[in-house]
Image: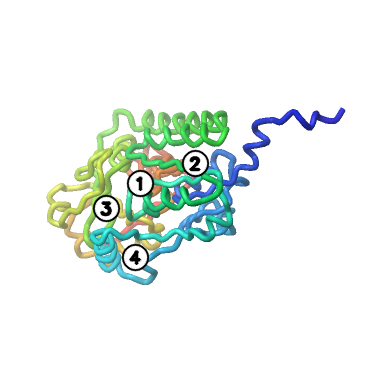
């Protein structure tokens, strides 16, 4: 018997939803919720999962490639002081796509197109898309964003499953390191100038059986001097330049090997920040498992994802 053509399943309507993601972490969340077929465009920085590489890009970097870390920092500061965005949005492409939903963020001006720019463009589109801003400061808020995005896309069951899986893995790590001596950790999000990681990273360090000697959970990343990092006496230094993979982070570490050596840490490791620490998406849990293995390898086995590259000084 053929289905009644007048009987419309609400989920069939949702399957036609056109979603544009303007944040790499949101892109990862959408795919983790099983909505990859509905994502019609992403940012120029979206690279996970691999399926996104073939999608249209609706943003571009104003600064451009090939700059040294200090030059990148200077360019970012100059643009933000002028009230200009770091990224530009392709309004013509968005008008052609006519999205139903745009997912963005307002947390970090260095990480995505300006939220105000997105709102202004959305108001000019004929499709009148809903705009959702995901702005987590902690691991818990990231999991809350999963629920928000799941509710907006008719994927509540997938959202529940994703949150429960993350919670189970987090609890497994915390149980494994319970009773272990906490390890003093410095998480360096940039090296020229030095930025210590904030937001969710100090929380990840705590859950992994350490304590962050400089960063504050839920707060913005902050600049510090090399002297301040040395005086904090970290036992382990995690080099995690924002947006860099592990190999690029290792290169940066060797560019500053003299400064790192003066910290007298017993271990210095470079990690893939772009994948596991910079983006507040589902792979933060992979980052937690990696940190726990770095700090307590006798209690936490090597994780299924992520690698720590030793900095030999």
Number of marks in the rendered image: 4
Which sits in the foreground, 280 or 41? Answer: 41
Element under disc 4: helix
Q: Which mark is residue 240?
A: none
Label 1 sits on residue: 106
In the visual, does 191 lie left or right of 300? left
Which sits in the foreground, 11 or 200? Answer: 11
Q: Quadrant of the N terminus?
A: top right
Between the residue at mark 1 and the residue at mark 4, the CA separation in whole angstroms equals 31 Å
Label 3 sits on residue: 188
Q: Position of residue 8 (x, y in %)?
A: 71, 31
Answer above or below: position of 294 versus 252. above
The residue drawn where x is 51% and y is 54% is: 42
**Mark 1 or mark 4, whichever is nearer to me:** 1
Which sits in the foreground, 233 or 50? Answer: 50
Q: Earlier in the sequence, mark 3 or mark 1?
A: 1
- Is there CB contact under 8 Å for labels 4 and 3? no
In the visual, does 158 lie left or right of 148? right
Q: Earlier in the sequence, mark 2 or mark 1?
A: 1
Between the residue at mark 3 and the residue at mark 1, the CA separation in whole angstroms equals 23 Å
Q: Which mark is residue 130?
A: 2
Between the residue at mark 3 and the residue at mark 2, the CA separation in whole angstroms equals 36 Å
Label 4 sits on residue: 251
């Amino acid at each position: 018997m053929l289905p009644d053509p007048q009987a419309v399943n609400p989920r069939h309507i949702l399957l036609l939803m056109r979603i544009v993601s303007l944040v790499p972490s949101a892109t990862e969340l959408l795919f983790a919720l099983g909505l990859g077929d509905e994502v019609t465009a992403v940012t120029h920085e979206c690279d996970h999962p691999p399926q996104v590489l073939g999608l249209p890009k609706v943003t571009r970097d104003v600064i451009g490639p090939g700059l040294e870390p200090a030059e990148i920092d200077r360019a970012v500061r100059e643009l933000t002081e002028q009230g200009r965005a770091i990224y530009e949005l392709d309004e013509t492409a968005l008008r052609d796509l006519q999205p139903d939903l745009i997912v963005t963020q307002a947390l970090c001006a260095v990480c995505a197109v300006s939220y105000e720019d997105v709102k202004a463009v959305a108001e000019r589109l004929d499709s009148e898309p809903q705009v959702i801003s995901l702005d987590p400061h902690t691991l818990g808020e990231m999991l809350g964003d999963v629920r928000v995005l799941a509710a907006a896309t008719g994927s509540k069951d997938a959202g529940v499953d994703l949150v429960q899986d993350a919670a189970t893995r987090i609890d497994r790590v915390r149980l494994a390191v319970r009773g272990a001596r906490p390890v003093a950790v410095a998480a360096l999000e940039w090296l020229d100038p030095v930025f210590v990681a904030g937001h969710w990273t100090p929380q990840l360090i705590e859950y992994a059986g350490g304590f962050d000697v400089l960063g504050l959970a839920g707060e913005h990343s902050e600049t510090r001097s090399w002297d301040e990092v040395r005086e904090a006496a970290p036992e382990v230094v995690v080099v995690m330049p924002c947006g860099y993979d592990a190999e690029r982070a290792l290169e940066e570490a060797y560019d500053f090997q003299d400064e790192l050596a003066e910290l007298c840490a017993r271990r210095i490791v470079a990690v893939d920040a772009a994948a596991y620490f910079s983006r507040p998406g589902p792979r933060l849990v992979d980052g937690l498992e990696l940190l726990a293995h770095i700090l307590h390898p006798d209690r936490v086995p090597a994780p299924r994802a992520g690698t720590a590259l030793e900095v030999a000084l």
